[in-house]
Image (cartoon, coloured by chain):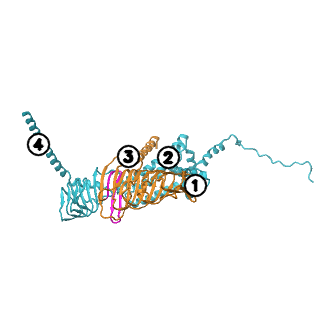
Chain colours: A orange, B cyan
Amino acid sequence: MTRLGLAAFVASLAGVVAALSVPAGAQTWRTVDASRQVRDTIAISVHVEYAAGRLDLKPATGSVLYHANVRYDADRTEPVARFDSATHVLSLGVRLRGRHFSGADDQHRAGSMHAELSGRVPMDLSIELGAVEADLQLGGLRLTDLSLRGGAADVTARFDQPNREQLRTMTLQVGAAQMKLLDVANSRVSRINAEVGAGALTIDLGGVLARDVDITATLAVGGLTLNVSPDDGVFVDERSFLGGFEKDGFVKKGDGWYSANYDAASRHVRVHLHAFMGGLTLTRVQK
Amino acid sequence: MRTLHARTATFRVVAVALLAIVAQATALGAQQGAARISADSLTKALAALRESPDSAWIPAASNFTFGDSTIAANRRAHGPVAVAGGTLHVRGTIDGDAVSYDGDIVVHQGGEIRGSAYAILGKVVLDGGVVDGDMRSLTGDLRQVNVPKGRVVRSRSSLTMHAVALAGGWLAVLVVIGIGVLIFASPNLDAVSDALERGFGKSLLAGIATQLALVPALALLCVGLVLTILGALLVPFAVVAYVLAAAGLVTLGYLAIARLAGRFVLGANEGGEGVRRAAALRSLVYGLLLLMLPWFAAGALSWSPKLELLARMIAVAVTWVAATAGLGAAVVSRGGVRRAAAPAAQRAMNTSSWATPTPVSGITAARRPTPFTTSAPK
């Protein structure tokens, strides 16, 4: 093989690699509008999976179980809107096709989904988000369990109106995402499990706190900001390596740190903190 | 006054003419709308939509009727009921799905669809009726999508092309890395190659042992760092460095095996530094081609699942043996460092400055000295 031949061979191979690694530029935009009428009020499970783009979710106004309007690029993604009447499982969302690269660029090239869920039917809701900018209005629904997972998402979830069921558990998993939950007291939650990798999670316990709340937070290198009303008593059981929380206004008693008003407060927030390098920031703002 | 009448009359004439033109255009448009859907175009359009994994609901083109259609009140029709280029009015009951292409589905008061309602390039309109299942409308660019899809069955030729292209991509990456190693770490590559030549079996055993020890060693490293408190901070960096080092050793070993294989095929080259380097590159490229050959074969045999499986098993075995022996050789030669020092020592041994040349004619043996005494033996 001569030098020239060898160079041509290597160049052609590099070309093959480049051709394989460059994503297809073509886009085929479609819109699917899916809905289903409410037939009964049997509890359902709702799974929302959205890979990349913009997501809005809110309570439905009409007598529909769900309504989803999805704009998607059929070359790269496929929509999911399916209700299994046998198992009472509703699946909504957009998945990436095949093994396409999912990066920051996807968010700009991806489409959008506007979804509505019935406020008449009790449901456990799990939402899994990739590179997504999401605005979730969860108040007014009948949530019994909530699971929210964000990879590289920018998520704001609100409970502007009270949840119409007791929310047993709220599970929050934050990879490298920014996740804000506002007026969480309106969700009538009793237990929150939060896992934060390298992202930032904000839990605002604004609204009407109807009962005591237990929060278990595991922080790797990310941070958790917790906003609690000044009237509520706070207890923090801290097990941290390099992370932790600012202890001003707290008193060490036995197994943990208590806010000065803990004994007098009618509602309590108990935080079980496991932090490696992440930190808990506690704010006390009346809303 | 007359001018005003004249203007009014002119406006009326113009307005009537415009209305006539608009009405004509509307009628023409409607005719064209109905006429633009042919059986062929419908078949093609539905075929494009069937590329989607969630397409089981799409009926065959032969099930479609063209133009407006009505399910009359108190009438029951078995689904799927499909129309193209028109509106489907449902006043009775459909036992199954309703599908429209380029038209709406209107469910009137008293009407019921007991399956789902799908409107392609149209809408599902509830006018007092009931749909038991999902209501879905699809609009936008409905041309056939043009990228490979994960769950869609590919054609055999597409599978073959994909597999061969994948193997080609790996080969290209390895060639590029190999060139980098030849430029920046040639002595290390030589040393690993030498270790392989000296004892392939020993290298293979060392490679297996290294593979078995990789994870426990990493765990020990992490535990050791954590025990030193301050070292715990370094755990993430240590893990990354460890993985990179292991990957580097495997790659170095694999390239050494490839070069050895290439040299075996091409034969050894003697000459100056330039010739030696060119030969090393040639050997490397040929060796990599040789090692990747089973993968290309497996790709080319994608049309036959059994042959492909066999070829893939061979490819995996060849790659594993090459990578393991290479890793072992890299470990034995300490990443090529041990051998890297050897040539210098060899050169030092070859220098004749200190040596005394032996005369060609030889040296006359001296008589062995015997003890000398002046006194006579008794």
Which residue is identified by label 2? B177
In percent of width and height, residue B96 lies at 25, 64
Q: Nearer the viewer, residue A190 or A75?
A: A190
Q: Residue furthest left?
A: B2
Q: CA distance from mark 4 to mark 1?
A: 89 Å
The residue shown at (49%, 46%) is B177
The chain to which mark 3 is attached is: A
Q: Kindly report the secondary structure that dominates the magenta region of the rendered protein.
A: strand
Q: CA distance from mark 1 to mark 2?
A: 30 Å
Which residue is identified by label 3? A108
Mark 1 neighbour density, 10 Å: few (under 14) some (14–19) many (20 or more): some
- SS of the residue under disc 3: helix
Q: Nearer the viewer, residue B142 or B94?
A: B94
Which residue is identified by label 1? B222
Are dots 3 and 2 on a single chain? no
Are dots 1 and 3 on a single chain? no
Q: CA distance from mark 1 to mark 3?
A: 40 Å
Which image quarter: residue A256?
bottom right
Which residue is identified by label 4? B16
* Callout 4–callout 2 Cβ contact below 8 Å: no
Does any portion of residue A222 appear in the rendered image? Answer: no
Q: Which residues are magenta?
A: A65-91
Q: Nearer the viewer, mark 1 or mark 3?
A: 3
